[in-house]
C-alpha cells in the first residue's frame, strides 16, 4: 500500500491526524518555493560546502569515516548501476557535548534555501523544549539528529526505528528513495533484543518469524515531497538514485504520555543522552533519567503543553 499523500495540511490537522494518531504521511506541497532544482543540487552543495568535512556512515548508523563532501561526491555520485554506493553521508548538527565534524556552520550557510515547513507546529515541543507561547524554527535552531543526508545510488539505511520513540521529518530535495515501512506491532517479528532484521537478507535463525512480518507501506519518495515518520514505526530506505535530503527528529507534546512511558520503561537507554542535551537548560545540574521524568511529569500536571494548542 502507498503512503497517504496530503497537501494544504494545517499544523492543527497535522498534530491531531498524524502526531497524536501516530500515522505516517507524505506532504506533497510543503517544499513549494524552496528552489530545489537550483539550490539543492550536488553541484551547488559542492560549490558551497565541498571543502567541509562530513560524517560518513555505513548502512546503519556506524561511523566509518570523516572526509570532505567533495571527495564523497567524487567517489559515490554518478556510479554505474552495477557498482552501487555503500557509504552514506549523515551530517548532523550538534546533538551532544563533544568536538566533532558537526554541520551547524553548513546549515547556517544554506539557511536561505529552505524554511520551516508550513504544516509543522512551531511550539508545544517537548524535545527540543518549546512550550507555548515560545516558538522555534527548524531552519535556525538545533533539533535532535538534524542533518544533511547525502547518498549515492544504492546506499541504504537498513531497517530501524528512530530512538526514544521520536518522530522524524525527511525533506527529499534531490533524487528518489524507496521506502518499506512496518507498523510498531510488527516488533516481535523484526527485533531480536536490540538487533533489527535485514529484510533483504534475513537471518532466519535469529528471526524465525520474519515471514509473518508484512509491510504496511511500500512507496517511492520523490523530489519535493516531505515524509513524516511516526514514532515507533520501522522503516528501511534505499536511494534509488543519487540523493540529497534534510531530516530531523522531535517529540511533540501531542505524544507526551507515550514519551513519558518510554523513558520510564527504558531509563538506561543510551540515546537518552541526546534528550538530556536538549533539555539541559530545564534539568539544571542533574543528568539522571529521573530529572527527565520529573520535567515530563510537571508538563503533564500543568496541562499547558498540549491544551494550549499548536502555534
Image (cartoon, rainbow, N blue to C red):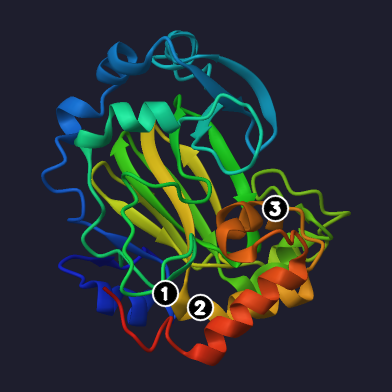
- Few, some or many C-alpha atoms within 10 Å of disc 1 (few <14, some 14-19, many ≥20)? many
Which secondary structure lies at badge 1? helix
Tell me the quadrant of the picture where the C terminus can be found.
Answer: bottom left
Q: Which residue is mark 3?
A: 273
79 or 165, nearer to the observer: 165
Which image quadrant is residue 61 in? top right
The answer to whether one can see residue 161 in this image is no
Extreme-front residue of the structure: 285
The answer to whether one can see residue 46 in this image is yes
Residue 19's label in the rendered image is: 1
Q: Earlier in the sequence, mark 2 or mark 3?
A: 2
Extreme-right residue of the structure: 205
Residue 279's label in the rendered image is: none
- Could you tell me residue 271's position as x and y percent? 70, 54
Q: CA distance from mark 1 to mark 3?
A: 23 Å
- Please tell me which residue is depicted at 80% across the width and 56% down the height of the picture: 194
Extreme-left residue of the structure: 33
Q: CA distance from mark 1 to mark 2?
A: 7 Å
- Few, some or many C-alpha atoms within 10 Å of disc 2 (few <14, some 14-19, many ≥20)? many
Q: Which residue is mark 2?
A: 255
Which secondary structure lies at badge 2? helix
> Considering only vertical position in the picture, is 194 above or below 259?
above
- Could you tell me residue 69's position as x and y percent? 45, 15
Amino acid at each position: 500500500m502507498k503512503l497517504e499523500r496530503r497537501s494544504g495540511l494545517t499544523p492543527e490537522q497535522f498534530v491531531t491526524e498524524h502526531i497524536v494518531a501516530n500515522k505516517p504521511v507524505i506532504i506533497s506541497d510543503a517544499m513549494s518555493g524552496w528552489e530545489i532544482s537550483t539550490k539543492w543540487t550536488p553541484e551547488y552543495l559542492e560549490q558551497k560546502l565541498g571543502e567541509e568535512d562530513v560524517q560518513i556512515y555505513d548502512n546503519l548508523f556506524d561511523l566509518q569515516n570523516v572526509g570532505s563532501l567533495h571527495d564523497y561526491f567524487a567517489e559515490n555520485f554518478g556510479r554505474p548501476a552495477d557498482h552501487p554506493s555503500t557509504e552514506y553521508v549523515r551530517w548532523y548538527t550538534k546533538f551532544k557535548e563533544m568536538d566533532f565534524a558537526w554541520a551547524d556552520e553548513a546549515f547556517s550557510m544554506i539557511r536561505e534555501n529552505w524554511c520551516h515547513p508550513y504544516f509543522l507546529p512551531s511550539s508545544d515541543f517537548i524535545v527540543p523544549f518549546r512550550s507555548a507561547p515560545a516558538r522555534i524554527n527548524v531552519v535556525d535552531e538545533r533539533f535532535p539528529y538534524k542533518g544533511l543526508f547525502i547518498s549515492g545510488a544504492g546506499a541504504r539505511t537498513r531497517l530501524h526505528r528512530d530512538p526514544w520513540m521520536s518522530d522524524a521529518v525527511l525533506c527529499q530535495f534531490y533524487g528518489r528513495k524507496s521506502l518499506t515501512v512496518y507498523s510498531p506491532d510488527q516488533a516481535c517479528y523484526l527485533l531480536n533484543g536490540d538487533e533489527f532484521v535485514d529484510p533483504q537478507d534475513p537471518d532466519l535463525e535469529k528471526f524465525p518469524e520474519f515471514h509473518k512480518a508484512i509491510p504496511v507501506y511500500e512507496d517511492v519518495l520523490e523530489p519535493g515531497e516531505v515524509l513524516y515518520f511516526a514514532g515507533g514505526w520501522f522503516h528501511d530506505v534505499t536511494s534509488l538514485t543519487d540523493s540529497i535530503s534534510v531530516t530531523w527528529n522531535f517529540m511533540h507534546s501531542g505524544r507526551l504520555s507515550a514519551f513519558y512511558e518510554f523513558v520510564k520503561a527504558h531509563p538506561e537507554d543510551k540515546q537518552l543522552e541526546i534528550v538530556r542535551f536538549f533539555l539541559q537548560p530545564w534539568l539544571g545540574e542533574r543528568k539522571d533519567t529521573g530529572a527527565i521524568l520529573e520535567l515530563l511529569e510537571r508538563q503533564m500536571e500543568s496541562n499547558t503543553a498540549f491544551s494550549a494548542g499548536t502555534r
